[in-house]
Image: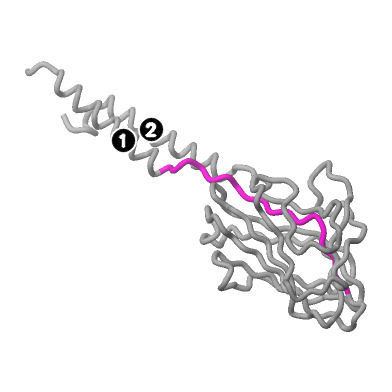
Amino acid sequence: MGFYGDPVMRTTSIIVIGGILAIAIQASSAEAALVANWNFSGYNGDDRSIGSEMGADAGATLTVDAGWSDADLDAVNGNVLNAVSGTPAGDAIQFMDSANNGLGFAIKADLTGFMNPVLSFAYSRPGNGFDDVDLFYSTDNATFTKFADVDNPNASAAVKTYDFSAINALDGDSSVFFRLVLSGASNASGTAEFDNIQLNAVPEPASLAMLGIGSLAFLAVNHRRRLHNCPAA
């Protein structure tokens, strides 16, 4: 009797396949987890490399472009827009001066074991501030691909959210970069403030392919043993 001709093996196969499909459905609906977060609590206005304050990637960093002078970076009062639940308003990072149009900052994070990243943050500016911001991503910190325009024409605080789930190259990568480039400030007093930057992602499921192969291999071995132990007719 063939592998699938055996009703017991056929039933077992259906159960295994059903289990794999159940895992796939559960994985697709898994909730995102916090990978990195910056609410700039205690930021001194001078540091160019700022570590994540909470999240799965303790080594995640935000790096300000070297071109910003100390005079054009500052810490200002923050808010709770886009803050992690239970996190009080801390500080925010402020960028200043139209002379710095074209500069920005980058976020580096390790997405090993994660997929479908989502980047969000609170962004505000005055009327003369940086109102033209571009968002890029990279996996090598050399070649960046533009993902979105992060413009804020209303000169008011707003939460911006960007879903990178369609960018498969970021899934599971150990060195993912997100870069924001600021432009549009009209004079030396023009500013932009960023606060409560969150990077969330969905934990990757166990490899369904390996699970399926392992399960079917077990069935095949078990089937051969049964045939071997079955007395001859």
Residue 62 figure quarter: bottom right
Look at mark 1 in the image and give the residue it sits on: 216
Q: Earlier in the sequence, mark 1 or mark 2?
A: 2
Asked if the residues shown at circle 1 and circle 2 are in contact, with their CB atoms under 8 angstroms apart, the answer is yes
Of 23 and 115, the residue lying toward us: 115
Badge 2: how crowded within 10 Å, few (<14), some, or many (20+)? some
Residue lying farthest to the top in this orientation: 231
Q: Classify residue 67 by image quadrant.
A: bottom right
Q: Quadrant of the C terminus?
A: top left
- Residue 159 lies left or right of residue 20; in this view the side is right
Q: Quadrant of the N terminus?
A: top left
**Where residue 16 is drawn, which disc sits there?**
2
Q: Which mark is residue 93?
A: none
User: Residue 45 magenta-drawn?
Assistant: no
Task: Give x and y (percent) for residue 183.
Answer: 78, 79
- Range of the magenta residues? 191-208
Percent across and percent down for residue 121 are 77, 59
The number of callouts visible is 2
56 versus 189 height, above or below: above
